[in-house]
Image (tube, helix red, strand yellow):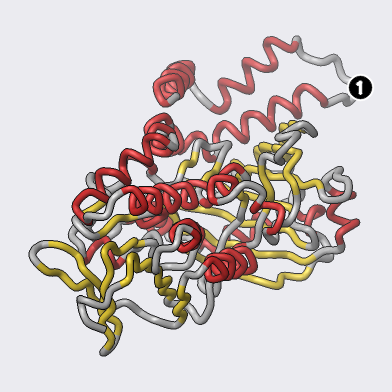
Amino acid sequence: MSAEEKFDAIIIGAGPAGAACAYVLAKAGKSVVLVERGASAGNKNVTGGRLYTYALELVEPGLYQEAPLERKVVREQIMMLGQNGAVTVDYADYGFGEEIPQSYSVLRAPFDEWFAARAEAQGAMMVPGILVEELIEADGKIVGIKAGDDEIYATVVIAADGVNSFIAQKAGLRGDITAHTVGVGAKEVIELPEQVIEDRFNLQGGEGAARVLIGCSDGVLGGGFLYTNKKSISLGVVLNPEDLAGQGKKIHDILQNLKMHPAVYPLIKDGMTIEYGAHLVPEVGYQAMPKKLYRDGLVLVGDAAGMVVNSGTILRGIDLAIVSGVAAARAVLKNDGESNIGPAYVAELENLALIPTMKLYANFHELLSNRRMMSVYPNMANDMMKTLFTVDGKLPERMDKAMLKVLKKHVTFGQLIADGWRGVKAI
């Protein structure tokens, strides 16, 4: 292909960000090629995972109704694990998004395949099994890609190639990923009958639960997650690889211990693991995003741009990826010149509240890097509950003194005040 015969856009990566961008551009009549390294879209993805529905509504109103989503999340749960028990905060709200459900659990492989196919149906050219090896530059601008002997040219290249974006590095927009800026996740999908899942999580047909797990990482910085799907449960952990290596522990051992925990095992008992995967995820949020998200002829979207939010209770990535893909598409549609697309893309990210959201949660990583959050406080919460509910026929200790004793067993007042202040500053 020559530079004169070029596409309007080349999109590298057929995940949610790339597919959303391709969908919007192709529907508007732009010529788009969607290049995917895997044999098919979703072939290489691993996720918990949850999709906040508003993002698909940005692509096209009502699109979520066609998507292969799992369960509408109506129960938000936080589970703090102690050695032999757990304290679970369970918030149920059946009005979450009365007109449009707020979020669904989702399995990435079928979702990504569906989304890429929908983009293809709008007119995007899907090219799977292609590894992009180089960017083509001319006069300081990115004008295309090289894959083997093939050269493909376009007005703009959209890098949606994931957390360890080779394209972002090639373009000089970010360096090698470092261990403290990413988490390593391991997940199992455990198959169970639909009715069993609903009984164990107090759900009715089509309803789902999303659970954040704290105190499940064997002292390693990180946490866990659990999502109910239609006929399976996604259970996993995301850990700091630097801390994991420093402590000489293995992530699959920690995940296995989590599965055997007496408060978790009854939830997955008699289930069959049908998928196991591991993946890197952006972990530091806004602080680790590239300082610049574009060059002339190139923009970064989704994980390639570090667009993930982890507040400790809310984990967001798929929706932000889709929003960034829509923002990139809108920037392309509004600007013919490749030099204008990058600034317009950042303006769209501001308009769609993505960058303001990233900034809002910018300091949460500091809070989550507090090691006491991973083990000390979950154990303290469990000890307090045990003290509160223990009846053995003996005269109970006054509750205020008993609770103070538990608190002093785990932290000093100085640590408690310091952690509280750190938490206030983080939010």
Q: Seen in the image, is 78 located left or right of residue 413?
A: right
Q: Nearer the viewer, residue 300 or 83?
A: 300
Residue 164 visible in the picture: yes
Query: Whole-percent x and y of residue 245?
Result: 39, 59
At horizontal 28% and vertical 62% (from top left) the residue drawn is: 156
Q: Pointer 1: what residue?
A: 393
Three-letter code, disc 1: Gly
Q: Is residue 190 left or right of residue 281?
A: right
List the single residue furthest toward the left: 139
Q: Position of residue 310 (x, y in %)?
A: 49, 41
> Is any part of residue 216 visible from this angle?
no
| Of 13 and 255, the residue lying toward us | 13
x, y (%) of residue 72?
74, 46
The residue that appears at 15% across and 62% down in the rendered structure is 141
Residue 210 image position (x, y, % from top left): 69, 45
Q: Secondary structure at mark 1?
A: loop
Residue 103 lies in quadrant = top right
